Amino acid sequence: MKKYILNLLLAALLSVCMGTTAFAEESGEAIQIVATIFPEYDWVQQILGDQAENAELTLLLDSGVDLHNYQPTVDDILAVSDCDLFLYVGGESDEWVDDVLKEAVNEGMVVLDLLELLGDSAVEEETVEGMEAGEEENDEEEEGETEYDEHVWLSLKNAQVFCEAIAEALEGLDPDNADLYAENAAEYVSRLSALDEEYQAAVDGAAVTTLLFGDRFPFRYLTEDYGLDYYAAFSGCSAESEASFETITFLAGKVDELGLNYVMKIESSDGKIAQTIISCTSTQEQEVLTLNSMQSVTLQDVEEGVTYLSIMEENLEVLTQALQ
């Protein structure tokens, strides 16, 4: 069904695009940039700096919709097809991209696939002890297919790689301002690196090194970066929302066994599973803490000053508390 809908959208796109040329070619001015998710959008803004007014930057997932549930509209497909620079994650949720790029109007488009940029540093989705194995995980095991964890932006180390690639792409598209992009990227990467060091220091001084999520777990890259262990109700890309009695009791037992003071959730969760886990522990005195996976950021949030760094700084405060 999804494939059928995408084909209809592509047909509509072709009818719209007949006889048109890319905006950048017509105007000779603005670079057309499309980012699928908020972190990409913010990284581009930071590297553009003062040149942001000379670029037209579009965020596709701009209303808080989750990457895993997103379906492109005709306008979205048109924006991608006509842009000069396109950034996307490149995982299973972005399977629609291949068909859109085949019909792209701008043949000179620069495309940045984040998972491809990571190469061997990309990690696979995994089901750890006690975690619910949903239908998707079971199907993949039967088919023998590899599914990579898509939440690549939740690593400050990865972000540095991505920002350097963005700067290189902008330098190629706009050579007159190449020095500015290189300078902005170097300054921003330095800030990412400094925050990365703060994360490492927080982990080095932690009393515990295990996080327990009564929720989906999109923070695999973050835990890999700092050598943290984790337990969770669901994997990061799981569509499950109800945890079994076995999962609840297992996670509650781990809270008791490890002496954890906190049960974690992500920003879009109502926290009911986390609270249920706490109610099944021996003391029932743990608190629920929230880590922001940036999957619900809207353009309104951006207008109010939310940035990738501001969220990662807030996450550091939460992480430091969680590891007490």
Image (cartoon, rainbow, N blue to C red):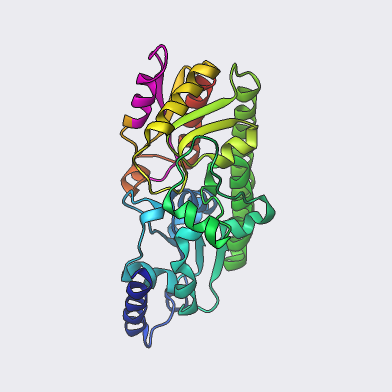
Q: Residue at x 31, y 30 (%)?
A: 272
Q: Residue at x 33, y 48 (%)?
A: 64
Number of numbered discs overlaid on the protein picture: 0
Q: Quadrant of the N terminus?
A: bottom left
Q: Residue at x 64, y 39 (%)?
A: 190
In the image, is residue 272 part of the stretch drawn in magenta? no
Please name whichever residue, 45 or 123, is drawn nearer the observer in this view of the structure: 123
Please, is residue 96 above or below residue 37 in the view?
below
Please name whichever residue, 5 or 83, is drawn nearer the observer in this view of the structure: 5
Q: Position of residue 96 (x, y in %)?
A: 44, 68
Q: Position of residue 159 (x, y in %)?
A: 58, 46
| The quarter of the displayed image where residue 78 is located | bottom left
Q: Is residue 323 visible?
A: yes
Please, is residue 219 above or below residue 137 in the view?
above
Question: Residue lying furthest right in this view?
Answer: 120
Please indicate whether residue 9 sits to the left or right of residue 171 in the image. left
Q: Residue at x 43, y 78 (%)?
A: 26
Please name whichever residue, 99 or 161, is drawn nearer the observer in this view of the structure: 99
Q: Which residues are magenta?
A: 273-296
Please, is residue 182 above or below residue 276 in the view?
below
Q: Position of residue 134 (x, y in %)?
A: 43, 48
Please indicate whether residue 103 sits to the left or right of residue 229 in the image. left
Q: Position of residue 175 (x, y in %)?
A: 62, 65
Q: Is residue 271 visible?
A: no
Please indicate whether residue 204 sits to the left or right of residue 51 in the image. right
In the image, is residue 286 part of the stretch drawn in magenta? yes
Please, is residue 229 above or below residue 137 in the view?
above
Question: Residue lying furthest bottom in this view?
Answer: 19
